[in-house]
Image: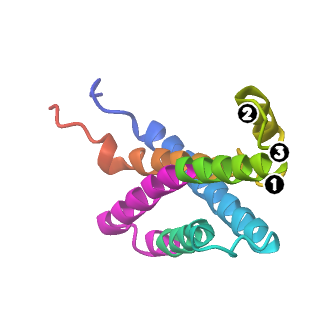
Amino acid sequence: MDAGRPSLAADRVVEMFRRWVLGIIVLGLVGTVTELILLEHYEQPLQFVPLVLVGLALIAIGWHAMRHDGTSLRALKILMGLFVLAGFVGMAAHFRGSAEYQLELDPEMSNWDLLLKILHAKAPPLLAPGMMLQLGLLGLAYVYTDARYRRSDSP
């Protein structure tokens, strides 16, 4: 037995785990897009970003499930990276939107009070875009646990 390579049983466990992770990603994507549509999260151009990314991710996952090739895996890697970026951009946009609203209500509000109001705001919820971040990180974990990334060049 080669000490540098994982056993066949370990490979099977990793592949089973990867299938579960992919299923969780799909559930998260479907749940996210459903919630965004029900909340009418498409009033401004920036609000289309998560809808488009989720749609593209579902297409890429379907493509990867059928082909399981390097190109589909690369597409998933790029999309999941965009999900992470969109999560951070979304949090910044929600923060800015909430700050503008709170300052309209009370222009004399202190920075500390403003921050507390933003953190407790229900609309727009500051941490809601974190779902995009979580899905992106989970997707990247899926991509980088692919056998193509686990191969060892040692003899």
Q: Is residue 112 left or right of residue 67?
A: right
Q: CA distance from mark 3 to mark 2?
A: 10 Å
Q: Are marks 1 and 3 in contact (CB under 8 Å)?
A: yes
Q: Is residue 31 above or below residue 84?
A: below
The C terminus lies in quadrant: top left
Q: CA distance from mark 1 to mark 3?
A: 6 Å
Residue hosting label 1: 123
The magenta-colored residue range is 62-87
Residue 32: x and y in percent read 71, 62
Frontmost residue, 144 versus 17 = 144
Q: Is residue 73 above or below residue 145?
A: below
Residue 123 visible in image: yes
Label 3 environment density (alpha carbons within 10 Å; few <14, some 14–19, many ≥20): some
Amino acid type, residue under disc 1 in the picture: Ala
Residue shown at the point (44%, 42%) measured from the top left: 11
Label 3: state its secondary structure. loop
Amino acid type, residue under disc 2 in the picture: Leu
Label 2: state its secondary structure. helix
The N terminus lies in quadrant: top left
Residue hosting label 2: 115
Residue hosting label 3: 121
The mark that comes first in sequence, 2 or 1, is 2
